Amino acid sequence: MPENETRQETLPQLDDEEIELLLESLLFVASEPATADRLATALGVETERVQAGLERLEQHLKQRGIRLQRLHNAYQLVSAPEAADVIEIFLGLDLSTKLSRAALETLAIIAYRQPITRPQIEAIRGVNSDGVIRTLLHRGLIEEVGRLEQAGRPILYGTTFAFLQYFGLENLETLPPLDEEALAELAARAEPLQDSEPKTASPAAET
């Protein structure tokens, strides 16, 4: 018997308001982003009802101190970007370190062109990007998402939930159009990082 059917036998029939309430609770206690399918299994309802509930929850949270963040088909609750400065002070975080211009430029290319390989990034930037990619991987702002099926099978990179959190974005669809003005906007929205960039890059590579 499918797990959803088992759950439906033990849970009362849920209306839309109850689903939204329970989704907020599940995401609050989740230790990692949760997919709509996983949430549907937990509630014993159809995935479509969970997705509709998540859309309602996202709208209801827009005026609150918590936001619903989505990357692909996974969701998590995060603090509102407007509260970042106060949260940093409250938690005593180090406000001194931000990404370099080279790292920010590379991150923007990955965000808008993902999935993308290192040679493709370097073709756009015109410079070696080994060091800056290592920096972004170290920060958890990008990750390996697969391999391009061509000679050498180069690694494909994409952004992470940490990227969305860093720029105060709810999802990738809220990225502004890619141009110099957008890059400046991203730089202005970026939150300080808590430790310095690694110094493992070769002298010829940018960081």
Image (cartoon, rainbow, N blue to C red):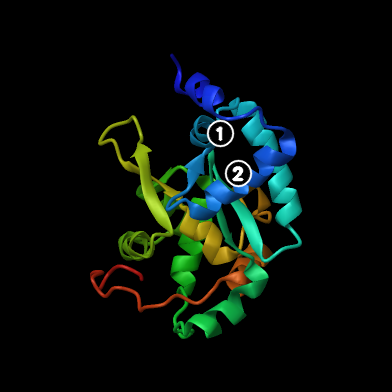
Type of amino acid at the residue the image marks with label 1: Leu
Q: Residue at x 63, y 68 (%)?
A: 81
Q: Quadrant of residue 182?
A: bottom right
- Give residue 124's position: percent from left, percent from top: 48, 53
**As rendered, which of 131 and 175 lies closer to the eye?**
175
Above or below, 166 relative to 56? below
Q: Residue at x 62, y 52 (%)?
A: 68
| Among the two numbered marks 2 and 1 on one chain, the one whose residue lies closer to the N terminus | 2
Above or below, 189 relative to 48? below
Q: Residue at x 35, y 66 (%)?
A: 135
Residue 198 in view, yes or no: yes
Drawn side of residue 46 relative to residue 131, left or right: right
- Give residue 116's position: percent from left, percent from top: 43, 44
**As rendered, which of 96 and 9 lies closer to the eye?**
9
Drawn side of residue 126 relative to residue 68, left or right: left
Type of amino acid at the residue the image marks with label 2: Leu
**As rendered, which of 128 and 173 lies closer to the eye?**
173
Which element type, helix, strand or loop, lies under badge 1? helix
Are the two marked residues, 2 and 1, in contact with CB atoms closer than 8 angstroms?
A: yes
Which element type, helix, strand or loop, lies under badge 2? helix
Pointer 1 residue: 43
Q: Quadrant of residue 170?
A: bottom right
Pointer 2 residue: 23
